[in-house]
Amino acid sequence: MIRKASDYTDLNKACPKDPYPLPSIDRLFYGRLLGLQPNPNAPHNEEKIVFITDDDAFYCKVMPFGLKNVGATYQRLMDKIFKEVMGVDVEVYVDDMVVKSAVASEHRKALERVFGILRKQQLRLNPEKCPFGVHVGKFLGFMLTERGIEANLKKCQVVISMWSLQSIKEVKQLMGRVTTLSRFISQAAETAMPIFGTLRKGGNFIWTPECEEAFLWLKAMLATPPVLTRSCLGIPLNLYIFVSDAVVSAVLIQEREGEQCPVYITSKVLQGAERRYQRIEKAALAFVITLRRLHLHFQNYGIVLRKPDLAGRMVAWSVQLSEFDISFERRGHVKAQALANFITKLTPIGTPSVEEGVWYLSVDGSSNQTGSGVGIILEGPEGILIEQSLHFEFRASNNQAEYEALLAGMKLPRELEVKKLMVKSDSKLVTRQVNGEY
């Protein structure tokens, strides 16, 4: 057998990018692995991949890997060929396949259907890459089992066996490995923030005690990574969101027979203007990021948004969320260990104590020659903080602005169905009239 090596750099630069999407691991389920050979080229493109030897010029009769659009082209072909059984009997990622069955007795029939399609399309399998009837298999770097998606223990062990880092190069290696396994780490971005700090431009590499603590925490999480289960239709999904100054995170949980099973864990380091978002905007951003990554999980759910009047990016995000149906509830008892780690790690420090069930509304209005406006702050239990500022298009005196501030501020707790509310205002006129003193 002759194995050739060709450089398609110039050809790839000349080819337009094929936008056909490739499936992610989140679409795939446990099953049995198969290997598949590449599909044929279109005849009119064969001359573009000619390679020259000392004796003659040759071209491939099948599409060689290394071309820019080979992945998208191959995936489109596989989706077309296996259209009738895709998502039912088989999942395909480029040249890798998973033939799956929920019941062992049905697996033979599933294989027969897949083999029938392969035979009809004259596609061949590589026997060395075709284990059958297995309950565990590695696919796209993850371990697919009957329980769900598990972390690749070899990749986890690589991180666990690392010593304290000595250079920026080692930090980059660690961050690459952690990114690959981040879905199995509660609050990966928040935990790794001290380590990220060593990559700042212009600074000398310093491995601080905070970096070492974060490093040890990452190792501890990867020593016993959680199993991410597949979401089941008909059972509500619970999404827990955490917001800090620099990171937003979320964990998706589904309760089955009294057990809380993690479905997905995600986190994102806020960049630039995102760090200046208000707290409610950061929470909405965490929600949007999660739904973008888990769009398929939410296809059978919708969203009901109950919110005060917001503008700008909040409106844009609400449009993205409007196709789903999701309700919001107070956090209940934490049972799952993965969720317990998530909540323990993510509980913000220094949150002002607020009496349970009581909300505090602070309003202030002002007026000058250039115009008038109001500022509103609503504080709720568990550190909830909503801030808004409004500019009036009409002229108003200071007293009028104070009244407008109160009226505008009262709309927020009303929208949120607040039962107990204490209002704070620096206007004696407003407070005494509301309290009935005159």
Image (spheres, rainbow, N blue to C red):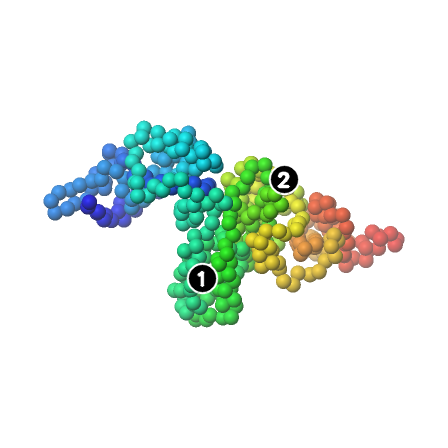
- Distance (Cα) linking label 1 and label 2: 43 Å
**Residue 17 in the image, given as x and y percentages of width and height:** 35, 42
Q: Is residue 201 visible?
A: no
Q: Nearer the viewer, residue 425 or 360?
A: 360
**7 sits to left or right of 248:** left
Task: State the residue at coordinates (48%, 64%).
Answer: 215
Q: Helix, strand or loop at disc 1?
A: helix
Under mark 1, the amino acid is Ile
Give me the residue at 56% from left, 44% from top. 317
Q: Give percent across and percent down for residue 187.
A: 54, 56
Image position of 187 (left or right of 327): left
Going from N to C along the chain, the mark reached first, 1 or 2, is 1
Query: According to the image, label 2 marks what residue?
Result: 304
Residue at image position (74%, 52%) is 357
Quadrant of the rendered structure where residue 165 is?
bottom left
> Where residue 274 sits: x, y (%)?
54, 54
Which residue occupies 84% across, 53% down? 435
- Per the image, label 2 sits on a secondary structure element best described as loop
Looking at the picture, does residue 118 appear above or below residue 54?
above
Residue matched to label 1:
160
